[in-house]
Image (cartoon, rainbow, N blue to C red):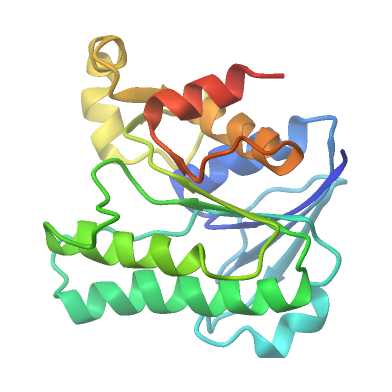
Amino acid sequence: MKINAIVTGATGMVGEGVLHECLNHPDVEQVLVINRKPCGVIHPKLKEIIHLDFQNFVPIQSQLIGYNACFFCMGVSSVGLNEEQYRKLTYDITLHIANVLSQLNPSMTFCYVSGTGTRSDEKGSMWARVKGKTENDLLKLPFKKVYLFRPGLMKPTEGAKKVLKLYTYFGWLYPLVRALGGASTLKEVGIAMIHCAQKDYGKSVLEIKDIIAVAADH
């Protein structure tokens, strides 16, 4: 199955890594990135829309038709934000975009990057509740399939430009965290998303071990 994918968050670490895998994968024919600022990547497969208001995708919706996958990699840290601010940037924006895409492309597979520790029962810490609510409401939308990715520590792709300082300082711990089941590579996250767009894996929530297994399955 050939994939025409929309990628959000390509100016961040996870989105950059997923975009890299899409552009290099033979089964991905087209990639559309939607950013507030240019991602700095030029490629024959790639189209970019610069759009400032992520709370209103209606003005660009005519350009979003014809895609069968969305790899949603946008995200912000909850550090320094209260619950209302974090919910607006996490839940509100995600559900607005997903609602628009589900109406335009009902045959779309939607992959959402959440995070390990997210609570499906919407309890626990603030960020875990908000992410859990976001996941639960995405599952209610009329997509072909929704996959909820819960990665932990991710080893950046070699040559990546948008590596978080956390990974620069603590990258040496990766082999240990991987051995303990708490880490994957960013390449595995991207490849797993592509595989999810091609095949039904029977479960919606993909924890770290699931991401690694799906990436290896082809």
- Say if residue 174 shows up in the picture: yes
Relative side of 173 to 80, left or right: right
Relative to 180, 213 lies left or right: right
Q: Position of residue 165 (x, y in %)?
A: 27, 39
Q: Is residue 125 above or below residue 55?
A: above
Q: Residue at x 33, y 67 (%)?
A: 133
State how many labels appear: 0
Q: Residue at x 77, y 69 (%)?
A: 105
Q: Position of residue 142 (x, y in %)?
A: 65, 69
Tell me what residue is drawn at x 59 percent, y 77 percent.
99
Q: Nearer the viewer, residue 69 or 14?
A: 69
- Image location of residue 93, percent across then percent down: 45, 76
Asked where in the image residue 50 lies, by quadrant, the reply is bottom right
Residue 83 versus residue 102: which sits nearer the camera? 102
The residue drawn where x is 61% and y is 35% is: 201
Q: Is residue 78 visible?
A: no
Screen quadrant of the N terminus? top right
